[in-house]
Image (spheres, coloured by chain):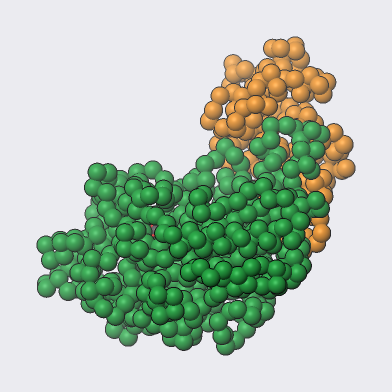
Chain colours: A orange, B green
Amino acid sequence: MELTRRDALAALAGAGVVGGGGAAVLARDPFGEAGPDDSPGATTAVLPTLTAAAEVVYPSDLDGIGEFVETYALGRVADRPDDRDGLASAVREVDAAAREWYGAAYADLDRSSRDEVLRELGADAADPDPAGSRAERVRYYVVNELLYALYTSPAGADLVGVGNVVGHAGGTEAYRREP
Amino acid sequence: MTVLDAGPRFEGDDRTERMERALRPAHHPFEVWSMGGERDAYASSGERHYPLNHARVKGVGGSTLHWQGMVMRLHESDFRRRTRDGVGTDWPIDYETLRPYYAAAERELGVAGAADNPFAPPREEPYPMPAFPPSHSDALFAEACEALGVATHSVPNARNSEAYDGRSPCVGYGTCKPVCPSGAKYTAEVHVRRAERAGATVIPEAPVQRLETGGDGRRVARAVYADDAAGGAERTVTADQFVLAAGGVETPRLLLLSADEDHPDGLANASGAVGRYFTDHLFAGMGGTLDEPVGGNRIGFVTGESHQFYDDPGASTRGIPGSDADLGPIKLEFLNYDGTSTVRAPSPVRIALDDGAWGDRLLDRIRERYGNGVAIGALVGQTPRADNRIALDRSRADDHGNPVPDVRWSIDDRTRRTVRRANEIQRAILSELGVDVEWTVGPENTGPAYHHMGTTRMGTDPDRSVVDRRLRTHDVANLTVASSSVFPTGGAMNPTLTIAALALKAADHVAADL
Ligand SMILES: Cc1cc2nc3c(=O)[nH]c(=O)nc-3n(C[C@H](O)[C@H](O)[C@H](O)COP(=O)(O)OP(=O)(O)OC[C@H]3O[C@@H](n4cnc5c(N)ncnc54)[C@H](O)[C@@H]3O)c2cc1C
Ligand code: SF4
C-alpha cells in the first residue's frame, strides 16, 4: 500500500497543524540545527533516522514512508518547541546507540538491525513517557509518535479496513456501514 | 454581569493536542483538562469510592468540555417519583412547566434528534437538527431487540449533524468524550462567548471562596474570590443578584464554606439539606465479541437507545420475562464503542500504542483485537438518600486553605436491584445477538455516570429543601442556583438538558427581579 501526501496532511490536521499546508510547512526545517557539537549523535540528521525507524515500526508493505514522515514529523513539531526538542533528542539517542553498538549510522543499518537497536534500547517493553528514561522517551517520541501518525490517518483506517479511525476526522458515513 | 470561574480558559486552537493527550497512553486522563492537584483535592469517605476528578472539569466551559453530549428530557413520571413509586420526593414543578424551556434549551445547545422515540414525553416541535443515523452495530442490535419485542430508536445529541450556530458539523474524530477537536459537540463555551459579546465580563482562575451576606443576613452582599492569575489575592464582587452554578459538588460546598454567625451551618442551609441527597446515575453494562465484524469506534457517541424500560422497568416483552420488583427507571444505550470509554476502548490507535508490538506483527494484532467488540450500557436511576452527601472534610485543605469536599456516597438496595434488572435485559439482548459476554458491570462493580444531583434540592417547604420553584434559595433573597444540584430526584436521563432548561427558567426570574 502507498502512503500518500494526503495521509500525511490528514495526520497533520489531526495533530492540529492546519492552514500552513504541506508546502509552507515543508519550507521550514525545524531540525536544521543539529544541537551542540559535543552532544551524542550531534551530527545525526533527524529525518533519515526517523524514517529508518518508521520502516521498522510500520507494516512492511507500505510505500511512501519517507515523504509521510517528512511531511508529518516536520509539520507536526514546527510550532511545538518542546515536542520538537524531545523528538530530536530521542532520535539522536537511537542513532548514537546504533553507532556505538553496530558501528554505523542508524539509517545505514539493515532493517533487522534497526529493529534490534530499538529492542536493545528497551523501546518494545518500556511504557511511553516524554520525561522518562531513554527507553521510555524512545518509546514515546519515536515508536509511538510514528504509530500515532499512521493509525490516526486514512492510511491507518485502510490498513485496518474500517473506513474511519479514532483520532482522524474521517466523517460520519463510515460508522453506518459494515466494516 | 461578571462571571467568576475557578479554572482557566482553554484556548480553542489546542484541542487536537488535548485529543492527543487523551489518546496517548503516556498521559493521565487528568492532563486533558488539567484537573487534579491541590486545587481539586477531595475526600471520599462513603461506602463507595467516588472518583470526583474524573467526573468534572474546572475551567471556562466546565464539565461540558469533557462530556459525552447526550441530551434527553426527563419523563413526566420523573417529576412524580413519590406519588408514583412511593420513594424519593416529587418535584415542585411538572413537565409542562419545563416543556417550553426544554424546547428553548434544545435550540440553544443545538440538538440533533428525531421524533422516532415512542417512549419520549410529548414535544411540540422538531429538533433543531436531524438525528444522526443509526450505526452498523445499532442495526444489529435493532434486529435482536425486535425479536425480543424491544423497541429501539435514535438518540438526541448536543452535537451538530449539520452546520449549526456557526459551528462545524461532526467530522468523526471519535474522541467526543473527553474532547471534540472540531467544535461539533456543544460545550458551554458557546454561551460564554455569547455572554461576552453581550457585555459580560468573564474572570477565569477566580475561585469563589465564600459568599458574604450584609445587613440582616437575608441578602448576599458580595462574592469573595481568589485572583489566582495574580497570585491568589482576595478580591470582591458586589451585585444585586447572585447566581451559583458551580456544579453539583462545589455549589453545596461553597454554601457550606460561607457559614458565618448568622448562618452557622452554611448559607441557605436552615433546612440542613445543603449537600444532602447527593444522587448520581449508575452505569450498568455488558459486552463481548461477535463472530462478525462490528466496527466500533468510528464515531465517539451513541446513536441508538431503548427507553422501553424507563417508565416500566419491570415490563415483560416477547423475549424478556417481567419483574414485579420495586425498580427505578432504566435507560438502555447501544454503544458505538466496545467499552465504557471512547478513547480508552480498543480503537486501532490505542491498540497500536498499548500493544508493544510493531511492524507487521502489530498490524496483525490490531486486526485481531479490533472490530468484533460489542457493548450495551444503561443508566439506572438512584433513589435519593439524605446520608449520601457532600460535606466538608476539615482535616484537609485545598490550595487556598479551604476544607475539601467529602463525597459520602453509597448505593441502596432498590438501585442495586435496578442495576441487576438492567443486566438481565442486557444479557437477553446480547444472547439473542449471539454475543459471547466477556464483561459485566453489575451491582457489585457499578460506578457513577458523573451526574451530580440533589445537593441543593428544590421544594416548596423551606424546612426540607434549599431552593424554591423559582430556583431561588428559601433563606437568602437574591441567591439563585442553576445546577443539577436542585433536582429533587434524578430519573435516569443524562441531566444537562434539564440543567439548561432550569437555567433558562432561573434567568427569567432573575431578569424579572433586576
Ligand atoms: C465524562 C462525563 C460525561 C458526561 N456525559 C454527559 C452526557 O452525555 N449528557 C449529559 O447530560 N451530561 C453529561 N455529563 C454531565 C455534564 O457534564 C454536567 O451535567 C454539566 O456539565 C453540568 O454543568 P454545570 O454548569 O452545572 O457544572 P460544570 O459543568 O461542572 O461547571 C461548573 C463550573 O463551576 C466552576 N467552579 C467550581 N467551583 C467554583 C468556585 N468556587 N468558584 C468559581 N467557579 C467555580 C468550575 O470551574 C466549572 O467551570 C458528563 C460528565 C462527565 C464528567
Ligand atoms: S465524533 Fe465527536 S469528537 Fe468527532 S467531531 Fe464528532 S462530536 Fe467531535
Instruction: Identify the residue at image location x=75%, y=11%.
Output: A103
Identify the image quadrant of the C terminus of chain B: bottom left
Measured as percent of width and height from the top left, residue A47 is found at 73, 31
Q: Residue at x 46, y 83 (%)?
A: B95
Taking the spot 63% from the left edge, 40% from the top edge, the residue there is A77
Please determine whether, in this image, residue B404 is positioned above or below residue B466. above
Task: Name the spot of residue B450 as percent of width and height, x first.
Answer: 47, 58
Q: How many marks?
A: 0
Q: Is residue B43 left or right of residue A161?
A: left
| Most foreground residue, A178 or A140 | A178
Question: Residue B358 location, x and y as percent?
Answer: 75, 32
**Looking at the picture, does residue A143 appear above or below residue B163?**
above
B195, B162: nearer the viewer: B162
The residue positioned 76% from the left and 38% from the top of the image is B365
Is residue A121 positioned above or below B366 on the image? above
Q: Quadrant of the N terminus of chain B?
A: bottom left
Q: Quadrant of residue B367?
A: top right
Where's residue B484, x and y in %?
A: 41, 68
Q: State whether residue B48 appears in this view.
A: yes
Q: Is residue B395 left or right of residue B436?
A: left
* Residue B331 to residue A39: above or below: below
Quarter of the view holding residue A135: top right
Q: Does residue B343 appear in this view?
A: no
Q: Nearer the viewer, residue B193 or B143?
A: B143
Question: Is residue B275 toward the left or the right of residue B346 in the image?
Answer: left
